[in-house]
C-alpha cells in the first residue's frame, strides 16, 4: 500500500475505517495512532509528516465516530475499543505496531498491553490513566450536564477549555471557531458520547499494570485541567521500566499545542527502542 487511503472491513461484527501512510524506508515498522474521546484519525494530523519519514503510519476512526458512525452497544467498553485496534491491525496486515494513544485511546493501548502484548512493539500513552481520578470524573460529569441541558452546541463550545491552555486559546480564536464548526458538523451523537464516556470512567487497569513488560512511554502536561499529571506519574510508576515525560505546558492536547516538541520526544523514544532491539 502506498500513500494515504481509507478503507472499511467487515468482520461480521464491526466495520473499521482506517488510513495507511506508507514510508519510503523499506521494511519500516508501523506506528498506530489512537485518538481520545473525539475518536477520529484527524486528531493526529500534527504528527503525520514527522512520523511518516521513518515509519508506516496507521490511523483510524473509532466505532461511533467520524466515518465509522453507528450505534454502540449498551455495554460498550475499553476492551471492545482494544479489540477494534486488533481488527485494524489485521485489516492492514500489521503483525505488531508501536501503539500511541491519547487519553481514551491510551486506555485501549493499556488493555492491549495486558491482554495482547504480542501485537504491540511499544506503548505510548498521552494524558491517560489507570483508573479515572475524582477530578477527571467531575470534569466529565460537567461535560455531560452541558450536553444534557445545552445540547451539542454547548458541549462542543466548552470542549476547548478542557483541551488547550488558556493563553493558547486566546491566540487561536479563529482556529477555535473553525474547530467548533467542524465539531458540530461531525458530532458523534449524544448517546454515543455517553456510552464512550461511561466506558472510560469504568476502566480500571490498576491490578494488571505490573504485568506490562513492553517498552512504555507515558506523556503528560503539568497544566492539563482534565487529567491531572499525577495520574500519568502513577501510571508510569506502576509499569516496570516506563519512561515518563511531563511537559510544563501544553494541556490535554499537548500533541496539538506543542507538536514539534511532542514529535521529537516521541521519535526519540521510538528510535531508542529500535536501537535497544538491534543491540
Image (cartoon, rainbow, N blue to C red):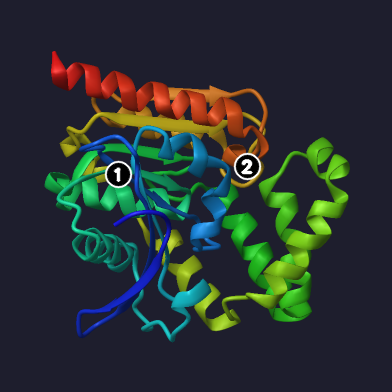
Q: Picture quarter containing residue 85?
A: bottom left
Residue 222 appears in the picture as rendered: yes
Q: Residues within 10 Å of mark 2 (few under 14, many from 20)?
A: some
- With 213 as the anchor, is 41 left or right in this view? right
Which residue carries the number 1 mark? 206
Residue 204 appears in the picture as rendered: no
Residue 156 in percent (x, y) is at: 72, 67
Q: Is residue 13 above or below residue 257?
A: below
**Who's the residue at 45% across and 44% down the image?**
128
Residue 205 in percent (x, y) is at: 29, 48
Q: The C terminus appears in which quarter of the rendering?
A: top left
Q: Are marks 2 and 1 in contact (CB under 8 Å)?
A: no
Q: Secondary structure at mark 2?
A: helix
Residue 108 in percent (x, y) is at: 33, 55
Q: Picture quarter containing residue 176?
A: bottom right
Inter-mark Cα distance, 2 to 1: 28 Å
Q: Number of marks in the image?
A: 2
Q: Residues within 10 Å of mark 1 (few under 14, many from 20)?
A: some
Which residue carries the number 2 mark? 256
Amino acid at each position: 500500500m502506498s500513500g494515504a487511503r481509507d478503507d472499511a472491513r467487515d468482520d461480521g461484527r464491526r466495520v473499521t475505517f482506517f488510513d495507511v501512510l506508507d514510508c519510503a524506508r523499506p521494511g519500516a515498522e508501523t506506528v498506530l495512532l489512537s485518538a481520545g474521546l473525539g475518536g477520529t484519525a484527524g486528531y493526529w494530523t500534527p504528527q503525520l509528516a514527522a512520523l511518516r519519514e521513518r515509519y508506516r503510519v496507521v490511523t483510524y476512526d473509532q466505532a461511533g465516530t467520524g466515518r465509522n458512525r453507528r450505534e454502540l452497544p449498551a455495554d460498550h467498553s475499553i476492551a471492545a475499543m482494544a479489540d477494534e485496534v486488533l481488527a485494524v491491525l489485521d485489516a492492514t496486515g500489521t503483525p505488531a505496531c508501536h501503539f500511541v494513544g491519547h487519553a481514551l485511546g491510551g486506555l485501549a493501548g493499556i488493555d492491549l498491553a495486558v491482554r495482547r502484548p504480542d501485537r504491540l512493539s511499544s506503548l505510548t500513552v498521552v494524558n491517560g490513566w489507570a483508573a479515572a481520578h475524582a477530578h477527571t470524573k467531575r470534569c466529565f460529569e460537567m461535560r455531560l450536564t452541558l450536553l444534557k441541558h445545552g445540547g451539542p452546541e454547548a458541549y462542543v463550545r466548552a470542549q476547548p477549555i478542557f483541551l488547550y491552555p488558556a493563553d493558547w486559546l486566546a491566540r487561536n480564536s479563529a482556529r477555535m471557531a473553525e474547530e467548533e464548526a467542524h465539531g458540530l458538523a461531525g458530532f458523534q451523537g449524544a448517546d454515543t458520547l455517553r456510552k464512550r464516556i461511561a466506558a472510560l470512567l469504568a476502566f480500571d487497569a490498576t491490578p494488571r499494570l505490573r504485568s506490562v513488560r513492553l517498552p512504555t512511554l507515558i506523556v503528560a502536561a503539568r497544566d492539563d485541567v482534565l487529567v491531572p499529571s499525577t495520574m500519568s506519574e502513577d501510571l508510569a510508576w506502576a509499569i516496570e521500566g516506563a519512561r515518563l515525560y511531563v511537559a510544563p505546558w501544553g494541556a490535554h492536547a499537548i500533541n496539538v499545542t506543542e507538536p514539534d516538541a511532542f514529535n521529537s520526544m516521541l521519535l526519540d523514544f521510538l528510535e531508542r527502542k529500535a536501537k535497544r532491539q538491534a543491540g
